[in-house]
Amino acid sequence: MISLLANPLRFQKFARYAAPIFAFLSIICIGAGIWFGLWHSPADQLQGHSARVMYVHVPAAWNSMMAYSIMAVSSLIFFVWRHPLADELAKACALPGAAFTALALFTGAMWGKTSWGTYWQWDGRMTSYLILLFLFIGYMSVRATIENKQQAARIAGLVAMVGSINLPIIKFSVDWWNSLHQTAVVSSPGAPGLPGSMLTPLLLMFFGYSFFFGWYVIRRVQISIIENQKKRKNRQKPTTSIRVETIE
Amino acid sequence: MNGFLSLIARDLKLAARSGGTWAHGLVFFLIFLSICAIALGGDSENLRPLAPALIWLALLLSLLLSFEHMFRSDVDDGSLEQMKTSDMSFMAYVSAKCCVQWLLSVLPIFVFLPLAAILLNLPVPVTLGMALSVYCASPALICYGAFSAACLSGYKGGGILIVLLSVPLLVPLLIFGIAAVTSFSQSGTVSSEFYALIGISLIAIAVGIPAASAALKTSME
């Protein structure tokens, strides 16, 4: 599937249909997730209705880590095989990843204030997640600062790859350190799991965010392909002032 | 091996001839600790619990200042291009740079740690734990810094960006380092935080040096 899409022309054909479908699915899933999450699911036993921010916070956190993983893997593909589309994919993942990270941090602080009494604590999970935000910002600033854009792409790819060591630290930090943050409820084997009425809006929001992320990335890569085509065409233009009439 | 050793000898000679520039980080380390002690009131009871954190901060800041100059002089006067055209591998070059940086930036810290301990009124076990944690973490500090410096070696105004790039990689070392000193001063034994520091250091050597040499190669194209 990935190698099918690696051809830019085939990717453009795919994107014409995929992007609107992803947008539609994202709106449906987020809408349904909000409806289930705010009205149709039970309130938490201890925290009451404030625990409903979980439906915004947790999918954002999962998606930000997914965004960083995609960025790191496509940076690796670009670095090793020098495939330009992989670099465009990595570049497209940076901003939504940073946005999801900021959203998760913000909603997490809100939730922490109501349930733990503090907006923030410098424990392993929250510190390493803040580091993820710094890694996204560092990636974007490296791309912006270095003038030669081919160099910038390779060096930013290196930054993404070296920083990927942070992902297992985030994942396992709640197990390694005593933390205010709770341990894995849904995803680990042996985790207590969520009741279905709470799992449904959580998964709906997660898929909604993922479709949104996919829509954004597909559109961004589309735009990059068109921009690169334009740049190549402009470079091939004759620089003399004689106007040549061509029959198109 | 010959090239590696000759690179180390070259850099050490250059540092010796630089008129004391290599000691700037060290001076910053001592000045930072002094003004911390002054700012926190100078009362030894206040300073003692904060001392491991302050020493680690001073070390981190003095190293962050020195990363910018790791590759700058070689890029500016063209020596890096000469090394590229010679048969010296970039990995050997970066490894030599890291060794020299360790010898010039970290080794003097061990000499001055007792002085820092006196400045902040630390007992001997804490100083020993401090020295051990710095020793275990120093390869990672140097290698991650070399990686950030190599990424931005082609960019002239790169100073603060090098700090921005290296901070995400160095913060786990800070956390584990201070935890290691605290646990050593309480229990007297080398505990899991030291193993974590050693693990991060080994990963940093294995990942940071090749990544730094790749970044240097890229910024020279």
Image (cartoon, coloured by chain):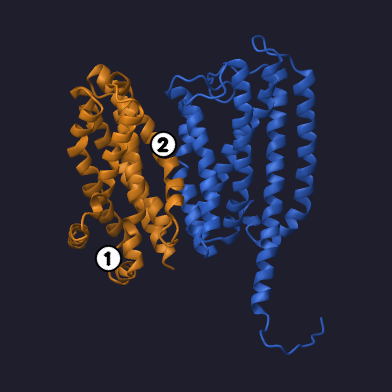
Chain colours: A blue, B orange
Position in image of residue A175 (x %, y %): 46, 23
Residue A185 against residue A104 in the figure, above or below: above
Label 2 amino acid? Val
Secondary structure beneath label 2 = helix
Query: At 68% from the left edge and 32% from the top edge, which residue is drawn?
Result: A206
Q: Which mark is residue A175?
A: none
Q: CA distance from mark 2 to mark 1?
A: 33 Å
Q: Which residue is mark 1?
A: B88
**Same chain check for tags 2 and 1:** yes
Q: Earlier in the sequence, mark 2 or mark 1?
A: 1
Secondary structure beneath label 1 = loop
Residue in front for this viewpoint, B69 or A219: B69
Q: Which residue is mark 2?
A: B171
Q: Chain of mark 1?
A: B
Query: At 29% from the left edge and 40% from the top edge, which residue is drawn?
Result: B31
Residue A198 against residue B91 in the figure, above or below: above
Label 1 amino acid? Met
Residue A95 against residue B133 in the figure, above or below: below
Among the 4 quarters of the image, the one containing residue B47: top left
Residue at the extreme top of the image, as rendered: A45
Q: Give neighbour class at mark 1: few <14, some 14-19, many 20+ (Cα, 10 Å).
A: some
Label 2 with label 1: CB-CB less than 8 Å: no
Query: At 78% from the left edge and 45% from the top edge, which residue is drawn?
Result: A21
Residue B196 in view of the camera:
no
Task: Give the total of numbered labels.
Answer: 2
Residue A218 against residue B134 in the figure, above or below: below
